[in-house]
Image (spheres, rainbow, N blue to C red):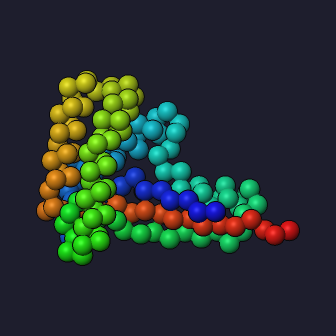
Amino acid sequence: MEAHETLPAVFSKNQSLAPDNPLVDLMRDLVRAHSQIGRPLDPMSSFRVCAEEAGFIDVSEEIFEAPLGNWPEDQQQKDIGEMLASSFKKGLHGLTAKAFRDILGRSKEEVEVFNAFVRRELDSNFYMSTLHVAVFTARKSEL
């Protein structure tokens, strides 16, 4: 079996993301909101233990870096980055509406303004933002 998950953090190829960057705030606050309701946003952190307890063997994990935006020079990476940024922008309301309003107690207006800042960052290539994608593989024993 194979499972893919995006880790709930944003990174930067040029190490320039400040702790108060809207993309950093987005991930931090999503993690906080989901933790408050007992639904961790990082299921991959327990994948190995769960897979082994379920009888899987040869469990492995590999982390890949994926661009977030069209800053890469390589055309394939640029296409991936554009697709990821577009998906983030289109799904941003769905990610934040319930989590930020109902769980973190923010107003609808606060969330909309915050989302506008996040979208602006997604359009900027200055930070060379990346996501880390974990790929887990495992197989069932033949016994």
At x 22%, y 38%, the residue is 115
Res 41 visible: yes
At x 59%, y 63%, the residue is 2
Q: Quadrant of residue 112?
A: top left
Q: Quadrant of the C terminus?
A: bottom right
Choose between 22 and 115: the one closer to the eye: 115
At x 24%, y 31%, the residue is 111
Q: Quadrant of residue 93?
A: top left
Q: Position of residue 30 (x, y in %)?
A: 37, 42
Res 15 visible: no
Q: Position of residue 57 (x, y in %)?
A: 72, 68
In the orientation shown, which residue stands out farthest toward the bottom?
74
Q: Position of residue 72 (x, y in %)?
A: 22, 71
Q: How many marks?
A: 0
Choose between 111 and 25: the one closer to the eye: 111
Position of 77 relative to 112 (above/below): below
Q: Quadrant of the N terminus?
A: bottom right
Q: Is residue 26 left or right of residue 113?
A: right
In the orientation shown, which residue stands out farthest toward the right?
143
Q: Position of residue 38 (x, y in %)?
A: 53, 36
At x 50%, y 71%, the residue is 62
